[in-house]
Amino acid sequence: MIQDLKREIEELGQRIESLVAAQNLATKKKEVILLEEEMSRPDFWNDAEKARDVGKRMSQLKGSISVFEGLGNAFMDALTLAELAEEENDESMEGEISAGIDALRKSFEHCELTSLLDEPHDINNAIMSIHPGAGGVDSQDWAEMLLRMYIRWAEREGFKAVVLGMLPGQEAGIKSVTLRIEGPYAYGYLKSEIGVHRLVRLSPFDTAHRRHTSFASVDSFPEMDEEIEIEIEEKYMEVDTYRSSGAGGQHVNVTDSAVRITYTHPDLARPIVVQCQNERSQHMNRASAMKVLMSKLYEIEMEKKRAAESEIRGEKLEIGWGSQIRSYVLHPYQLVKDLRTSHEIGNVQAVLDGDLEEFMQSFLKLRRSRKS
């Protein structure tokens, strides 16, 4: 049994070695040395924008080096433990070795997923929006279920999820929601979720308890730094204030602190509407809403470039039949299937509780293969 575990570690080690080798850590370490020399110059901070970019690049490089070197070290630790148990013929260590293999495999899969995130803004926080489609109250409830799913996913990743603005449904669910997911590579992960999500279940809102199909669209774009120059013409911008709704203590419904911004530039296919109500003051809500608007405008420009280059992206069509990227079936059987990659999972509840890594990884691998 010890020999089998050791063989399993060695096989996993070959995959780890290939993954680490592909990261060119030696080249990254050389770049770190050059950046450290640049940062040590007396005039380094004379150009604040360049200094910020250098600092961000340094952080990315050191983070990548640390993660992949840590993976290699974890493999050596697991192999050493197995070799020690084999030498001493100590079968009592099998449980510890097996648990170590599970942890090592999980770390490898996470690093493998991270290695697929190499586009310019993959490392950024993400701004997400969810809107129900065809299906009435069932779709509004489905949109709220998706909100819960992404919040749970963020919690699993150690990320922070902040609801910026939400419009509740009249009977149940939500009519729209915008949230920010804060964490390294949040956007890189969540770009795999862009598109229409379809739910098939026995409706809890149908007195006859018939099977219903519901749709909701998910969008995701990178949160941009305030220093990024995005031109926003105020003459096309309308700002409305209204009273916050939902949780928030005594402050809620006392002042018109929530902010809605509608941007109607003629170059846009349709107006952009953003809102924020989670902050304690109108000023702070406006600042947050402006940041979301800036990020959306930036993503629109990037989308134009990607379309021109015929780069593959999760497409958002009409929110209805034939346009979904993923199907969640709760009745008459249970299955979640990604229609882009054909990857499927039978444990629907685990997915709805935020276990999305397999779907994200399969999509990012497909995206990488189509680009190469």
Image (spheres, rainbow, N blue to C red):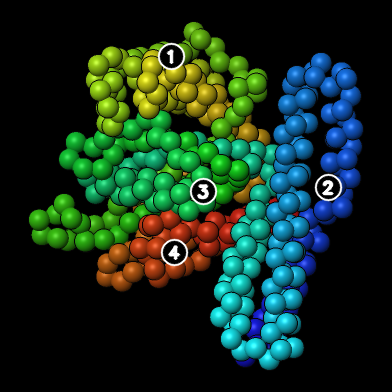
- Mark positioned earlier in the residue sequence (4 or 3): 3
Pointer 1 and pointer 2: residues touching (CB < 8 Å)? no
**Identity of the residue drawn at 89% across and 45% down:** 30
**Of labels 4 and 1, the one closer to you:** 1
x, y percent for residue 82:
69, 81
Residue topped by disc 4: 337
Gap in angstroms between the C-alphas marked 1 and 2:
42 Å
Pointer 2 and pointer 3: residues touching (CB < 8 Å)? no
Task: Determine whether 107 is above or below 222 in the image.
Answer: below
Is 29 on the left-hand or right-hand side of 84? right
Residue topped by disc 2: 28
Gap in angstroms between the C-alphas marked 3 and 1:
29 Å
x, y percent for residue 92:
58, 86
Task: Determine whether 290 is above or below 77 in the image.
Answer: above
Gap in angstroms between the C-alphas marked 4 and 1:
43 Å
Residue topped by disc 3: 158
The three-letter amino acid code for the residue at tag 3 is Gly
The three-letter amino acid code for the residue at tag 2 is Lys
Residue topped by disc 1: 283
**Identity of the residue drawn at 39% across and 15% down:** 282
**Of labels 4 and 3, the one closer to you:** 3
Q: Nearer the viewer, residue 169 or 332?
A: 169
x, y percent for residue 281:
38, 17
Gap in angstroms between the C-alphas marked 2 and 4:
38 Å
Pointer 4 and pointer 3: residues touching (CB < 8 Å)? no
